[in-house]
Image (cartoon, grey):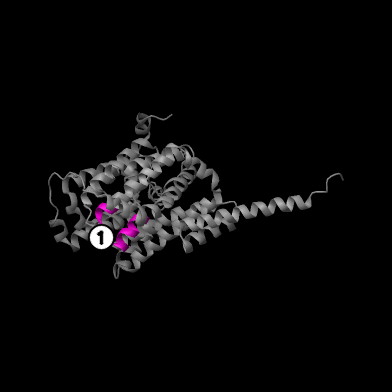
């Protein structure tokens, strides 16, 4: 059993790890800013607890495990007008249910139940979805798609396997410089001080609304992407440090049971985040520990005043990072042994949603198994001959 000290000794603290730490920025910033704008949740509080969860995750796992917003809850919050307490309540409910799944060992059973090719199909669909979203951010950026996105994409492609130059760090530094040049007023809005989270008031009605509107749609996605797909991807990327489904489920379950009461945006792990951070250089938990420490310092020092700077950050560069992260996750499908089943699952996930797509892939796998057994029975000689 690896101890916390062993994980700290194995962590790297170089520029590549710092670059990899920013690999999930294309998902993290747009979602957190979007939810904060739509619901009134304090951006500084979310940043504080995201940093705290990054540090806890870095101490818990040896791999660069991402901490990212729960996407289904984010989508419902932005499109259906949930309040801040309802969003936080949804995170509390999902985390409580996932914790039960983890403690009871049901996550391992779920993993054994879903065929590997179906999981690869889910990864392919999620990766392509992230890549398309990144492309949309780039295309909606006007002149920036040519001035910023095209050079950044060329640089990221050219240095995709470089062990010397930290690509994401270079892209982020460029974006920050462009932000400060174009929007000096965003920097002037920064308020230096001691910013600490406070408890958020809830009502029973908030939990009732959150359960049906956001928690139930999020739960299967969390189990599939944040537990099953993450563990499968970790076995591909880090066979020497395979993740336990029980441990990952317990980690997701504990995430929001504290932060939710303070009004932080609900967080989880994600296969896309893990793929993106590895794509941009992360190889150890050092990336996550550095990222968490940075978030904590910024959140305590500047709080929600950072949001103006984040809103002004070039979407074109976030789109490039998100697209490369998505393609890195989609690459996991190359190891599928049954490519037609993987493609069928991916198509179902893209067309019908992750849960329906996985269900379709599972049914197709079972039907194929039944047909194979019938063919074998038909080819065998009659009894007694």
Q: Which residue is mark 1?
A: 38
42 or 201: which is nearer to us?
201
Task: Indicate left or right for 381 with 374 as reference.
Answer: right
| Residue 74 highlighted magenta (yes or no) | yes
Q: Position of residue 197 (x, y in %)?
A: 19, 45
Residue drawn at point x = 51 percent, y = 44 percent: 111
Task: Indicate left or right for 109 with 64 as reference.
Answer: right
Q: Which residues are magenta?
A: 71-86
Q: Is residue 292 visible?
A: yes
Q: What is the secondary structure assignment of the residue under circle 1?
A: helix
Q: Position of residue 159 (x, y in %)?
A: 39, 53
Dominant SS type (magenta): helix
Residue drawn at point x = 46 percent, y = 56 percent: 354
| Residue 295 highlighted magenta (yes or no) | no
Q: Position of residue 76 (x, y in %)?
A: 34, 59
Which quadrant of the rendered structure holds the N terminus? top left
Quarter of the image where one finds residue 310: bottom left
Q: Is residue 283 visible?
A: no
Which quadrant of the rendered structure holds the C terminus? top right
Task: Indicate left or right for 135 with 175 as reference.
Answer: right
Residue drawn at point x = 28 percent, y = 53 percent: 205
């Amino acid at each position: 059993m690896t101890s916390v000290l062993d994980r700290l000794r194995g962590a790297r603290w170089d520029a590549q790890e710092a670059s990899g730490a920013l690999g999930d920025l294309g998902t993290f910033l747009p979602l957190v800013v979007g939810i904060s704008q739509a619901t009134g949740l304090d951006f500084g509080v979310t940043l504080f607890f995201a940093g705290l969860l990054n540090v806890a995750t870095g101490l818990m796992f040896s791999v660069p495990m991402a901490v990212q917003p729960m996407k289904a809850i984010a989508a419902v919050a932005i499109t259906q007008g949930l309040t801040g307490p309802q969003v936080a309540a949804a995170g509390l409910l999902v985390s409580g249910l996932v914790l039960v799944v983890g403690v009871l060992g049901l996550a391992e059973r779920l993993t054994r139940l879903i065929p590997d090719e179906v999981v690869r199909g889910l990864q392919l669909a999620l990766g392509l979805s992230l890549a398309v979203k990144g492309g949309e951010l780039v295309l909606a950026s006007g002149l920036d798609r040519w001035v910023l996105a095209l050079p950044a994409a060329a640089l990221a492609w050219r240095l995709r396997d470089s062990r010397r130059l930290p690509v994401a760090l270079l892209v982020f530094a460029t974006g920050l410089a462009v932000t400060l040049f174009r929007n000096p007023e965003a920097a002037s809005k920064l308020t230096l001080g001691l910013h600490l989270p406070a408890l958020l008031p809830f009502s029973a009605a908030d939990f009732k609304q959150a359960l049906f509107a956001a928690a139930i749609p999020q739960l299967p996605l969390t189990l599939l992407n944040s537990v099953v797909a993450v563990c499968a991807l970790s076995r591909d990327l880090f066979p020497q440090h395979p993740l336990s489904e029980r441990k990952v489920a317990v980690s997701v379950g504990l995430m929001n049971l504290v932060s939710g009461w303070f009004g932080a945006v609900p967080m989880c792990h994600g296969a896309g985040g893990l793929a993106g951070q590895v794509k941009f250089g992360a190889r150890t938990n050092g990336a996550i520990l550095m990222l968490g420490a940075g978030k904590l310092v910024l959140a305590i020092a500047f709080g929600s005043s950072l949001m103006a700077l984040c809103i002004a950050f070039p979407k074109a560069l976030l789109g490039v990072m998100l697209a490369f992260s998505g393609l890195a996750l989609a690459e996991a499908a190359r190891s599928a042994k049954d490519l037609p089943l993987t493609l069928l699952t991916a198509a179902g996930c893209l067309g019908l949603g992750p849960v329906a797509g996985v269900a379709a892939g599972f049914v197709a796998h079972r039907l194929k198994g039944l047909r194979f057994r019938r063919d074998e029975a038909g080819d065998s000689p009659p009894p007694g001959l």
